[in-house]
Amino acid sequence: MRDPSVGGRQPAGVLWDLDGTLVDSESYWIEGEYALIERFGGTWTDADALAMVGNDLVRTGEALRARGVDMSVDEIVRFLLDGVIARMGERVPWRPGAQALIAECLARGVPCAMVTASYRDYAQAVADALPAGSFGAIVPGEEVSAGKPDPEGYWRAAELLGVEAGRCVILEDSHTGVQAAINSGMPAVAIPFIVDVPDAPGLSRVGSLEELTVDLLGQIADGRVVRTV
């Protein structure tokens, strides 16, 4: 019997979320949030931090300001970004299987794009830690008119890659990001990490990027739904 994970067409493109999907950076963001709260004597909890996962940075800045951080939203966002970029310079905490899957895409000629609520300088710092050409496009949060769960970023990524959107596969780890993927109409794979991702019709779900290959993503692009978790 043929192995169902082998063969078939390749996906037109693979569209990656950044935080929690490509890199395990959430602890870096949370460190920055708590640092600001402690500086200004505000109130913040782990539940508050988890509620920010997958959301755009402006929303996080507004939430921190509402909890007592006496800085503008732009200043808060810049503080958080600078802190995470500095930590990435020390060590990039790749999610298991991320580098291998990106390398396979590069070797097979499958274009990848990064679609993130974070800003370009941070996204570029992560992309620069990978082999040249790993990402053909980056769509950061400050360059779209509406953040996730709006699908604008994913539509823009497919456009920038110059590929058929309907045969791209989106990789996401959060409920907000998965909702953006669903709203885009593109096939999507949820890899739940820090926060729960509710099931949805047609949504593939795996426990790790290590379970994915270019051939399997091609099958998902063609309509197969894979669920291992």
Image (cartoon, rainbow, N blue to C red):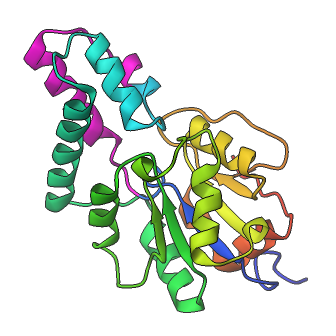
Q: Quadrant of residue 138?
A: bottom left
* Foreground of the two, 86 or 73: 73
Residue in the image at 42% along x and 84% along y? 133
The reply to whether the magenta stretch includes residue 34 is yes
Picture coordinates of residue 224 (x, y %)? 85, 63
The picture places residue 190, in percent across and down from the top left corner, at: 64, 49
**Which residue is at a point 64% across and 78% down the rendered structure image?**
162
Q: How many marks?
A: 0
Observer-nearest of 81 and 70: 70
Residue 146 is situated, as x and y percent measured from the top left of the image, at: 55, 41
The residues colored magenta run 23-49
Residue pushed farthest right?
Answer: 1
Query: Would you identify the image quadrant in which residue 14 lies?
Result: bottom right
Instruction: Report whether 200 appears left or right of 49.
Output: right
Q: Position of residue 125 (x, y in %)?
A: 26, 64
Q: In terms of secondary structure, what is the magenta stretch mainly?
A: helix
User: Is residue 31 shown to the viewer in this render?
Assistant: no
User: Is 123 placed left or right of 88 in the picture?
Assistant: right
Q: Is residue 9 magenta?
A: no
